Image: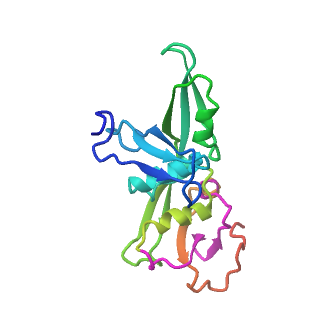
């Protein structure tokens, strides 16, 4: 039977750093109320190679939220140092390994919590990819790149219909393909209110109208 704290549909998720079975497997509880308010925790099985980032991606996939930006989430580890009221919170980097953190914890008890960051809204026009869809609105992190954004948008389309995609910054008579490492929120911060600029998702097969990649829009 499931604990009354856990989600009714809760089953164990295996998030592995490698494909082959390994020793040192641990089951951890990840409190993920930022994804679902009614959810107390999700049990996740990790190996010694599983990273915090892989745990986050696994949870988003499990809850069918692959269209959410994983850069908006991070894991913290709450440890009880002395008594129940004496707790410390450790922020885990994306490459941190929860299994290793548990082994290095001298206090014994710990609690993993999925936390959410504040993001910014981007509106990406995708009618060139799917004519019946005018645009997609996404909340993304300031650290999220154009390449990351395209990967998120791919989850919004049926398999096989998206093909090769690129993000473009367009205005009347001008256009520029964003480099994969450019950050859309940073690009949008430079837009002036009177300018009619937008982000466009364009298939790689679409005619680029002779514009060179990386050409400068601003005059």
- Percent across and percent down for residue 114 are 49, 39
In the picture, which quadrant includes the N terminus? top left
Q: Is residue 37 above or below residue 88?
A: below
- Magenta span includes 19: no
Residue displayed at 65% across by 47% down = 95
Q: Is residue 173 above or below residue 22?
A: below
Q: Is residue 40 above or below residue 69?
A: above
Q: Nearer the viewer, residue 69 or 83?
A: 83
Residue placed furthest toward the front:
23
Left or right: 134 with respect to 151? left
- Percent across and percent down for residue 167 are 58, 69
- Determine which quarter of the picture holds residue 7: top left
Left or right: 115 with respect to 64? right
Q: Tell me where the magenta segment starts and ends, as one range.
A: 159-186
- Percent across and percent down for residue 77 are 55, 32
Residue displayed at 33% across by 38% down = 6
Left or right: 108 with respect to 183? left
Number of marks drawn: 0
Q: Is residue 2 visible?
A: yes
């Amino acid at each position: 039977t499931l604990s009354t704290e856990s989600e009714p549909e809760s089953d164990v998720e295996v998030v592995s750093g490698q494909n082959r079975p390994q020793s040192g497997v641990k089951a951890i509880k990840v409190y993920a109320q930022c994804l679902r308010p009614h959810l107390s925790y999700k049990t996740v099985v990790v190996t010694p190679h599983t990273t915090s980032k892989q745990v986050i991606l696994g949870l988003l996939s499990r809850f069918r939220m692959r269209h959410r930006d994983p850069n908006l989430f991070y894991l913290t580890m709450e440890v009880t140092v002395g008594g129940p009221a004496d707790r410390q919170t450790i922020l885990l980097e994306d490459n941190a390994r929860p299994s290793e953190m548990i082994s290095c914890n001298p206090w014994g008890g710990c609690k993993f919590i999925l936390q959410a960051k504040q993001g910014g809204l981007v509106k990406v026009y995708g009618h060139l990819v799917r004519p019946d869809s005018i645009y997609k609105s996404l909340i993304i992190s300031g650290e999220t790149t154009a390449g990351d954004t395209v990967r998120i948008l791919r989850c919004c389309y049926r398999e096989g219909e998206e093909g090769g995609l690129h993000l473009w910054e367009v205005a009347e008579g001008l256009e520029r393909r964003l480099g994969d490492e450019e950050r859309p929120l940073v690009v949008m911060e430079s837009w002036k209110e009177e300018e009619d600029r937008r982000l466009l998702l364009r298939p790689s097969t679409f005619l680029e109208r002779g514009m060179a990649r990386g050409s400068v829009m601003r005059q």
